Amino acid sequence: MENTETRRLSRGETDMTKGSVYSHIIRFALPVLLSMVFQQLYNTADSLIVGQFLGTEALAAVGSSGTIIFMMISFFEGMFMGAGVLISRRYGEGDLEGVSRAVHTNVAIGLISGAVLTLIGVFFTPTLLRWMNVDPDVMPRAVDYFRCFFTGSLGMVMYNVCRGMMAAVGDSRHPLYYLIFSSLLNIALDMLFVGALGWDVWAAAVATVISQVLSAALCFIRLTRRGGAVKIYIRRIRIHAESLKKILKYGVPSGIQNSVIGLANVIVQSQINTFKKMAMAAFGAHAKIEGFAFMPINSCCFAITTFVGQNLGAGEYERAKKGARFGILSGMVMAEMIGAIYFIFAPTLISAFDTTPAVVDFGTQQAQIEALFYCLLALSHTVASVCRGAGKAFVPMMVMLSVWCVFRVIYIYFVMHFFGTINLIYWAYPITWSISSVIYVIYYLKSDWVHGFEKEKLREAVA
């Protein structure tokens, strides 16, 4: 096994087990944040351009089932988180052969996942939209949009596979460069297809697919040519049993966690859809804006998971705890600042998508109920990332399953049965964020999450 001290870093890689804790996390998180901004531009550009050129009904079609997309891809993304934890751990240990096995297993999983997601999305889109109570007036265009969108599933999946592997060894810059290019291309194609040529909502999905495939291709080419510790060799792409076992151990709980959150959000949106297309359009616009608001949280989460994984793999326990504290606090502060801005400027931001008064009213109401609670959302997600980085993915899975899924769904059905008002549906989010935050704080302070890998090694040695 190659020792960490003698490992040579390829361009873009970062050994987070040495140097300034704060500097490593900030320098890693900033490119991740920028890449998320550009990634969010994919669907936001679709919604903005569709809303402005094709009207409220088309905007409702694009936003009618965004939660379906999240639910379907989130399980696979959870699996890739598991691969990232394994790669970070092996990288911290200096086990580059173990890194390589994890990389090629992860690529094989990504190729299979992309194919499966494409088949499900293309063939079952009408059924899924009917489950979502999509307005019949919106249904034909929604089917066209989502079928076209899911044809690009392989590109979307493989970009996230490659980005996650680069991130696991501290490289958050190169995925950003490729994503900037493809995001700008997506906007240009949206303006061409929808704005200039006047094609319908399906064309916005086609623009997104082309851009996603290009970003994935650029990442893949880099990893096959200059991937360093995570270099991909085409002939080595296959499932390695030991790596698969670890990826499943770390990734399945994260995938289930993401999926149950997605399922709960699908149920929320299905209830929103009963208020018809104005509420649907507003919910879709709010989701796009909120996607930007969540980016600082998500960038901190990526940085925390990588930092904790590398340092616990290297046995740097105090350093891991210091980085976790800094990441959690940073995520909360940034999230609350953004929430305050959104609270104040919600009407203006919602009207950028659709100036219809009813749409603006619905969207503003949801924003002003939720935005000031973003610090609690950040707390839950960042502590969950600490758990994942420490190989404790089962913990956030159980918290999200019980609170963000089961409790949220029970709450939604209760308020719809007895009250039937949309503002009480919006309150489902801050209420469940608050409950999960209390649970996570108790776990973070009371549990021995720091020595998870060490205990796992002892169990493996005994076995």
Image (tube, rainbow, N blue to C red):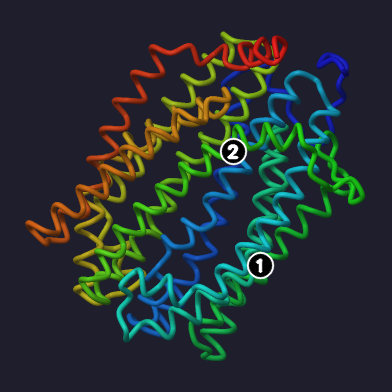
Quarter assignment of residue 242: top right
Quick one: label 2 or label 1, which is nearer the N terminus?
1
Residue receiving disc 1: 211
Residue receiving disc 2: 251
User: Which residue is drawn at the image coordinates 39% and 81% (left, top)?
Assistant: 58
Residue lying farthest right?
235
* Separation (CA) of disc 2 from disc 1: 27 Å
Q: Residue 41 in the image: x percent, y percent?
A: 52, 61
Nearer the observer, disc 2 or disc 1?
A: 2
User: Which residue is drawn at the image coordinates 58% and 48% (left, top)?
Assistant: 77
Q: Is 381 situated above or below 319? A: below
Q: Residue 49 in the image: x percent, y percent?
A: 46, 76
Residue lying farthest front?
463
Q: Is residue 381 left or right of residue 162?
A: left
Q: Is residue 357 left or right of residue 74?
A: left
Q: Is 356 situated above or below 254? A: below
Q: Are marks 2 and 1 in contact (CB under 8 Å)?
A: no
Closer to the camera, 396 or 191?
396
Q: Is 106 situated above or below 71? A: above
Numbered circles on residues, count: 2
Query: Local crowd at mark 2 within 10 Å, few (<14), some, or many (≥20)?
Result: many
Q: Residue 213 in the image: x percent, y percent?
A: 70, 65
Q: Amino acid at mark 2?
A: Gly
Quarter of the image with the N terminus is top right
Quarter of the image with the C terminus is top right
Q: Is residue 143 visible?
A: yes
